[in-house]
Image (cartoon, helix red, strand yellow):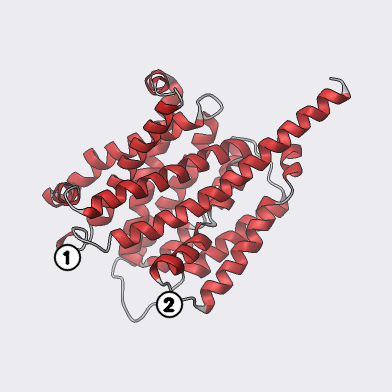
Amino acid sequence: MDQKAQILLQKKDLAFAKKGIGLGLMTGAAWGLDGVLMGMVLALAPFTDPLSIFAAPLVGACLHDGFAAVWLFIYNFINGKWRDYARTLKTRPAKMIILAAILGGPIGMSGNLLGIYFAGASYTAAITAAYPAIGAILGSIFLKEKISPRVWAGIILAIIGSFVVGFVPPEGSTYPHFYLGLGLASVAAIGWAIEGVMSTYVMDLVDSDIAIGIREITSFFVYLIAILPLFGKIGYHILSVSLTTPSGWYIAVIGLVGGISFTSWYRAMNMTGVGRAMGLNVTFALWSVFFGWLLNKLPITPNLIIGVIIISIGTILTVGNPKDLINLRS
């Protein structure tokens, strides 16, 4: 390869790396906004019935992933990729996408929500925020990804900052099933990490937009067929009622935000690697503070300020110099 061609190739790789980092930052921002909006909607009827306190968040997650799947299909249809759904589902990589979807969607998200229920939000956040580190370790083992010490430091700082942002000291309340909650939170962290590694592996063979589209469809149907029946009639009752109220259609709009976040996350993992993309995704805690303050009058407390500063430093270290990413990939 002559020198001119090599320079052009390096410039192309640098642009690719920068785009991947930008998408990683975008997925954090979109997921932060998604979480704040979902929190606001789940505080509305029909999700506020005392009998549905356990089922309501999972119904919301089901609706969210269902609408995200619809938006992603529309996007792929416009881009002429809709036929790739059927083609991909006939291949072996599709089985890995479906398995990753189940691990990261219904199992991961359910573990997270149930962890909050049994052990409290602060302890659950402390465990689930570790999923980028787990993903980076798995990525280095199974995908042979090379992660520099600086990026490792950034990932760890982002995790610590996310915990500081979400930490709320207990106020005398007790959790009789505390350790069960911690176990379920661990399931969520592991599920999200494995999803990232499996999806990144598959996206060497499957278009990332199709992969995330299949992921969301799978997640929706697993919620609908396997998760909601665990609550008897109440789950389907909330689901049907929500579609006749503004709340359900608010989630339809939020599903668009979620679809943007998911698409950006899958693309970022494909472009920058599992560890770096997950480290950037954790910035959703920072964005949650900003959007919570902007939309829901979230009070700015010292732990929020400290956490945001730590996440910002971690993000800078994680992003680093895009040229380093090219060297690591070569």
Kind of element beneath mark 1: helix
Could you tell me how far apart the alpha carbons at marks 1 and 2 are, in whole angstroms?
25 Å
Q: Is residue 31 left or right of residue 201?
A: left
Q: Amino acid at mark 2?
A: Pro
**On the image, numbered disc 1 is attached to which residue?**
50
Q: Please name the residue shown 24% across and 62% down the image.
A: 44
User: Compared with residue 198, is residue 106 higher up or lower down, i.e. above or below?
Assistant: below
Q: Quadrant of the C terminus?
A: top right
Q: Judge the density around disc 1: few (<14), some (14-19), many (≥20) Cα neighbours within 10 Å.
A: few
Q: Residue furthest bottom?
A: 172
Residue 169 tag number: 2
Query: How many neighbours does mark 2 have within 10 angstroms: few (below 14), some (14-19), or many (20 or more)?
Result: few
Q: Residue 233 location, x and y as percent?
A: 11, 48
Across and down, in percent, residue 158 comes to 59, 60
**Considering depth in this image, is 221 or 194 the residue closer to the camera?**
221
Can residue 141 be seen here? The reply is yes
